[in-house]
Amino acid sequence: MATGKTTSRGGRDSKPARAAKRAQPRRRLAKAGTDAAARQERVTERVVSELAHDIRTPLTGIIALAELLAASELGERERQWVAALKSSADHLATLTTLVVDAAKRNARELAPLREPFDPQALAQAAAVSLRTRAEGAGLACRIEIGTLPRLVVGDGVRLRAALENLIENAVKFTERGEVGLAVMAKRQGRRLLLQFAVSDSGIGLSAAEIRRLFKPFSQAHGGIARRFGGAGLGLSLVKRLARAMGGDLKVESSPGKGSTFTLSVAVGTGQSGQPAGAIETAPVVASRPLAILYVEDNPYARVVMNSILTALGHRPDFAGSAERALAALSARHYDLVLMDISLGGTGGIEAARQIRALPGAAGRVPVIGISGREDPAQARAARAAGMAEYLIKPVSPRGLALAIAAVLGASAGSAAGSAAARSRR
């Protein structure tokens, strides 16, 4: 006898089954929305990365020409101008890195660098920046730099950019009174933390405003954006960077009494090496002139590289495409190829693969890739395609000279080893 009850096996579905069916369209809609948002984020990141590449190309020229000028005979006043020019260009380069970082979806994707840098020099540079801005705004400035190690390992580039953001905010939100910077190194278990406290006597923040402060693209309140400008992105990104570097960003503030932002990052110690970003007064001149083919489709970049390579003592030729590069390598001998990664048409990575397929000595010529994108996956692909090195713009004359020396030294050692192996057979 029929009972009228619904079962999952009968002609009618049970209530849970009907509810599940009704929920399916909502789940599909939610998933579609999530997938669309993820695709949009990837598109945004790609567009921003390409923009950073376009900015870094002329920056290479500015930094390189400033470095070449610094190596020439200049008066003291002109030398200071050149130093200021290079410092400004270096800072602009760090800002392009931050712009790309802002488009990335989580802190794990930020991939901080692990390079030696001098925290004392970095702290002094930040102090000069704060003092200069404070003087321009008619504010007093207080600087306290404690005892710091001379060499640590970490991401000095992003650290300097993060500090510049805090310094700019401190001055921008302070109409009268003073701003300050206090720097110290602190042991925390086995870690060494660098701490930078940037303080001001400005407008201050309430507890509710502090909670909103670290949300992307938001200011503490609407009046801040209208009065002072800015997208509200900086502090959110600085906090993400600090956490990616093993530290944090904390704030103490009271309305009308000012704020103190304390940035901490973890660094390594006990390693030797040249501090990243160290200022050199002269590029490294080659021990012998090399025949170098530079493959680049940007005419401005070719002019700049011609100046760099000529100053280093080399004989450069230029090709505007992968096809012309292959033709040039087939026609004459080159000691080295410098390859822009983002070529129009056949890209630099594919061009490297095609070079490796050439017969004879042309297929063995060392290739150094140059890119405006700080992309670990692209760097791995470049090396897999046969590139011996992957440089990030902006490239200084000294940095290029050292890379060329390292690549050709490794290439010579490999060739000698192969010859020795053949002689033993």
Image (cartoon, rainbow, N blue to C red):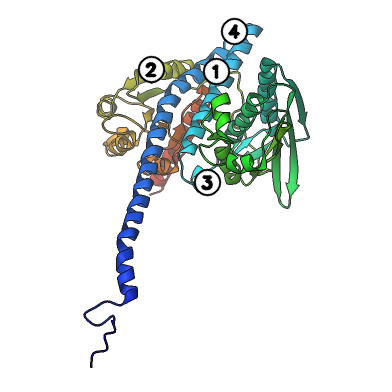
Q: CA distance from mark 4 to mark 1?
A: 12 Å
Question: Element at badge 1?
Answer: helix
In depth, the one of 285 and 186 nearer the eye is 186
User: Residue 60: horizontal and vertical position, in percent?
Assistant: 47, 22
Q: Secondary structure at mark 4?
A: loop
Q: Amino acid at mark 3?
A: Ala
Residue occupying image coordinates x 53% and y 37%: 218
Residue 265 visible here = no
* Pointer 3 residue: 107
Residue 381 locus on image (x, y percent): 38, 43
Residue highlighted by disc 4: 73
Task: Give the amino acid at mark 2.
Answer: Tyr
The amino acid sitting under disc 1 is Glu
Residue in the picture at 48% in, 33% down: 99
Q: Which residue has dot 1 on it?
A: 67
Q: CA distance from mark 4 to mark 3?
A: 45 Å
Q: Is residue 7 left or right of residue 244?
A: left
Can residue 24 be spotted in the picture?
yes
**Sequence-first disc among 4 and 1:** 1
Q: Is residue 139 above or below residue 152?
A: above
Of the residues shown, which amino acid type is indicated by label 4?
Glu
Label 2: few (<14), some (14–19) or many (≥20) C-alpha neighbours in 10 Å: few
Residue 79 coordinates in the image, percent (x, y): 62, 11
The residue beneath circle 2 is 300
Residue appearing at x 49%, y 18% in the figure: 62
CA gap, disc 1 and disc 3: 34 Å
Residue that appears at 30% across and 60% down: 25
Foreground tag (4 vs 2): 2
- Figure check: 77 above or below 159: above
Between 142 and 223, the one lying in front of the other is 223
